[in-house]
Amino acid sequence: MPYVKRIVCLANSFKIGGSCIAGRDVLGNGKYGGWIRPVSARATAEVSFSEYKYQNNASPKLLDIIDVPLLNAAPHNHQTENHVIDAKNWWVKNGELPWGDLEQLREHPESLWINSDSTGTGVFNCISQAEAATLHDSLLLIKKKTFTVEVGSKTWNGKTTKTYRGNFKYKGTDYSLSLTDPVAINAFAAKDEGDYQLSYVYLCISLTEPWKKDNNRCHKLVAAIMSNPPL
């Protein structure tokens, strides 16, 4: 039976073919439940703008409080937070989370899942499919006093494009993860290649499904950067 979950939006990030949106369940009376990731019924699970936009054609923003129409829970491997959307109904904005309330949602994991592997351009930014199978979650919200956005570039088939990474240390371990937050990317798109430091930011970290193009490794991503004022 269809149902509605009220969530505070903590990620609205790029995903191949659409977006990945995630947030925490708003229980009321200042309390919050677990993570919820609304997904489509398609095999690739991304949600398209036509499926998640508000009735006024606006896109959900970070810290929006949203009523999301859903059909059923659909946990998949370590992405236990997935719920299939009811694409026939609008998403409804019901307010915004005050910046000061975000600290209640902050998590304190000992590490960002398993630190075992890195791609050629990252640092502890991926794990094997077998390692991911031992996990039971794929979303985290952490806070960093210092965080660096690294603007770089790559060339493929003669075409050069900019790249964006989030570099930070968490509990003594260095991480360099791809940045998939479209608002943050847009904020740095016009800047020269280099490192740009931010202070006192909250980060939504997401762990992807296995990626066939990379030996089925699962990648850790900076899905959202939340700052005050916003980027």
Image (tube, rainbow, N blue to C red):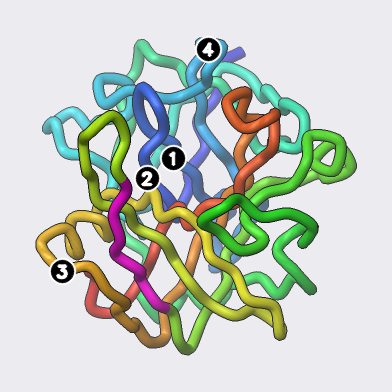
Residue placed most toward the observer, 108 or 125: 125
Provide residue 200's location: percent of width, then percent of height: 42, 85
Residue 41, above or below 93: above
Q: Are marks 3 and 1 in contact (CB under 8 Å)?
A: no
Residue 2, percent from left and from top: 55, 17
Q: Earlier in the sequence, mark 3 or mark 1?
A: 1
- CB of mark 2 within 8 Å of CB of mark 1? yes
Q: Which residue is mark 2?
A: 12
**Can residue 187 be seen from the camera position used here?**
yes
Tell me the amino acid under the disc marked 4: Ala
In what element is the residue under mark 4? loop
Which residue position is annotated with label 1?
A: 21
- Disc number for residue 192: 3
**Residue of label 4:** 41
Question: Residue flagged by tag 1: what amino acid is it?
Answer: Ile
Q: CA distance from mark 2 to mark 1?
A: 4 Å
